[in-house]
Image (tube, rainbow, N blue to C red):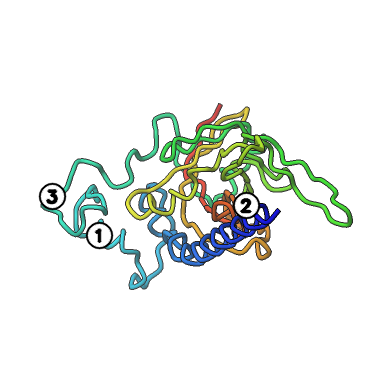
């Protein structure tokens, strides 16, 4: 009996220490996930133009760089040591063949959209998954969405790919013996990748494929997560964070930049 009590006590100490570590890790990750690209830089990368303000003093670093280096082909990872520049172009691989550049602010481009998402790809983290509509469940006096196992879930009350406003997608970070899978297990890597290269998200429907470019990542406490709408054609991907605690939510935001019909 005494041995059992000691073992249980030791396990409790280990659990408490682990929980404390991950809580501290959660707080320290806030800066890691706070990454953003300006909309000016997004337009520069996609080739979609919009009217420029008379005052250009607020131009993005990317725009200023492109004006200094013709073609803007030098990848940001080589900016500090241009003499060691490799062959990886800034924004590689760009917009694939078959896709037409569009503006996320253009209601005309979004007018042809409307089909439900069926597949999502993020080549930068080797994600390729089916998409299913999230189910709304009643839990006592509350209701909430249940993320499907081993699949990315789309909240059906939010917009479909290509439509103006924000479409919301959820996926599990990991699971331990529960069979839920880890479809968004590599989603946290996007924050680090975004500091060097653009990261693109492809969402497929029955009528074509929609290409979104990541504009920001962020972290919020789970109780502060709120679904928001937008005047642009955007998507937000969400997963739990940090591992084994899950009291934070990692958000990845992206804007529509290209469409492949059909």
Q: Is residue 77 left or right of residue 22?
A: left
Q: Are marks 3 and 2 in contact (CB under 8 Å)?
A: no
* Residue denoted by label 1: 65
The residue sitting at 61% across, 43% down in the picture is 171
Q: Is residue 211 visible?
A: yes
The residue sitting at 41% across, 53% down in the picture is 49
* Residue denoted by label 3: 84
**First reached walking from the N terminus: tag 3 or tag 2:** 3
Mark 3 secondary-structure assignment = helix
Viewer-closest of 139 and 115:
139
The residue sitting at 24% across, 51% down in the picture is 72
* Residue denoted by label 2: 166
**Label 1: how many residues lie within 10 Å, few (<14), some (14-19) or many (20+)?**
some
Q: Is residue 233 visible?
A: no
Viewer-closest of 85 and 143:
143
**Residue 198 picture location, percent across and down:** 38, 48
């Amino acid at each position: 009996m005494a041995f059992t009590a000691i073992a249980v006590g030791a396990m409790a100490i280990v659990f408490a220490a682990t929980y404390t570590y991950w809580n501290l890790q959660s707080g320290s990750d806030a800066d890691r996930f706070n990454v953003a690209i300006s909309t000016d830089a997004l337009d520069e990368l996609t080739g979609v133009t919009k009217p420029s303000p008379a005052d250009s003093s607020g131009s993005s670093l990317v725009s200023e760089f492109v004006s200094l280096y013709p073609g803007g082909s030098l990848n940001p990872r080589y900016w500090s040591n241009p003499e060691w520049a490799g062959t990886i172009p800034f924004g590689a691989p760009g917009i694939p063949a078959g896709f037409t550049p569009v503006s996320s602010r253009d209601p005309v481009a979004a007018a042809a959209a409307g089909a439900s998402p069926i597949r999502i790809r993020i080549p930068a983290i080797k994600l390729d998954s089916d998409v299913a509509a999230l189910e709304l469940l009643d839990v006592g006096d509350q209701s909430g969405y249940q993320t499907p196992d081993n699949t990315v879930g789309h909240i059906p009350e939010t917009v479909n790919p290509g439509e103006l406003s924000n479409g919301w997608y959820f996926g599990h970070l990991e699971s331990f013996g529960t069979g839920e899978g880890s479809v968004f297990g590599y989603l946290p890597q996007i924050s680090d990748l975004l500091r060097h290269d653009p990261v693109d998200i492809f969402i497929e429907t029955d009528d074509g494929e929609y290409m979104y470019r990541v504009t920001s990542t962020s972290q919020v406490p789970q109780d502060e997560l709120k679904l928001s709408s937008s005047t642009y054609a955007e998507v937000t991907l969400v997963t739990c964070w940090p591992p084994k605690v899950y009291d934070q939510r990692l958000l990845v935001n992206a804007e529509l930049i290209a469409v492949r019909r059909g």
